Image (tube, grey):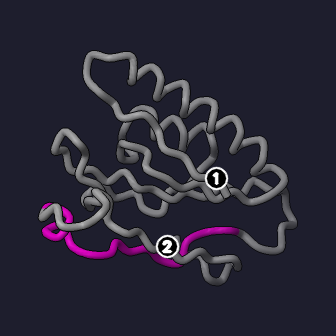
């Protein structure tokens, strides 16, 4: 299990290049570990799955995100941007015959977008709940 928090993509700063390097390095580590053991990677990626750094991390790390959708909101960034950036992804590249395959059963966000926007929470993120599937029969495609 790995937890990360990618740098925020501020405009006009060195953050975009730094995010690319963070994603590249993390993908290398995930890929190396996933050959031996399933990997669960989660965190505030400060970008959705279409973000350049996030898509690099997912593709190069062999990571499958909990959702291919981007129409949900988990974070109210410091600049007011609403983001789908709290992501959990799995990689399982063990050679056959692996007995089990790690995947997702379901996921949900706690609270509502309105509650997030109200500013009454201690966090600027909605709670994320993900159920993992440890057997092929449980994995939702």
The residue where tag 1 is placed is: 2
Looking at the image, the residue that sits furthest to the right is 97
Residue 14: name its quadrant.
top left
Say above or below: 88 vs 77: below
State the image coordinates of residue 119 (x, y, percent, origin top left).
16, 61
Tell which tag, 1 or 2, sits nearer the viewer: 1
- Nearest to N terminus: mark 1 or mark 2: 1
In front: 124, or 61?
124
In the rendered structure, the answer to whether residue 14 lies left or right of residue 60 reads left
Query: Between residues 59 and 129, which one lies in front from this camera angle?
Result: 129
Indicate whether 103 appears above or below 92: below
Q: x and y percent of residue 124 in the render?
A: 28, 57
Residue at (77, 41) in percent of width and height: 32
Q: Is residue 8 found left or right of 132 in the rendered image?
A: left
> What label sits on residue 130 in the rendered view?
2
Quarter of the rendering containing residue 86? bottom left
Disc 2 is placed on an element classified as strand
Q: Is residue 6 left or right of residue 134?
A: left
Residue 69, given in percent of the width and then of the height, sits at: 34, 58
Q: Secondary structure at mark 1?
A: strand
Residue drawn at (78%, 47%), measured in percent from left and top?
33
Badge 1: residue crowd in 10 Å (few <14, some 14–19, many ≥20): few
Q: Image point 55% across, 30% down: which residue?
A: 22
Are the two marked residues, 1 and 2, in contact with CB atoms closer than 8 angstroms?
no
Q: Which residues are magenta?
A: 102-117
Looking at the picture, how far across and down is residue 70, in whole percent? Answer: 30, 55
Q: Is residue 112 magenta?
A: yes
Residue placed farthest to the bottom in the image?
137
Q: Is 100 situated left or right of 110 in this image?
A: right
Between the residue at mark 1 and the residue at mark 2, the CA separation in whole angstroms equals 15 Å
């Amino acid at each position: 299990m790995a937890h990360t928090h990618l740098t925020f993509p501020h405009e006009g700063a060195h953050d975009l290049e730094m995010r690319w390097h963070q994603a590249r390095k993390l993908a290398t580590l995930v890929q190396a570990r996933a050959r031996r053991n399933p990997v669960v990677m989660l965190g505030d990626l400060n970008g959705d799955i279409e973000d350049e750094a996030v898509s690099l991390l997912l593709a190069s790390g062999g990571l499958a995100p909990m959702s291919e959708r981007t129409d949900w909101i988990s974070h109210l960034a410091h600049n007011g941007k609403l983001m789908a950036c709290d992501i959990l992804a799995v990689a399982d590249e063990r050679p056959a015959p692996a007995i089990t395959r790690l995947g997702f059963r379901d996921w949900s966000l706690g609270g509502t977008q309105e509650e997030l926007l109200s500013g009454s929470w201690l966090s600027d993120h909605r709670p994320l709940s993900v159920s993992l599937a440890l057997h092929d029969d449980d994995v939702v495609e």
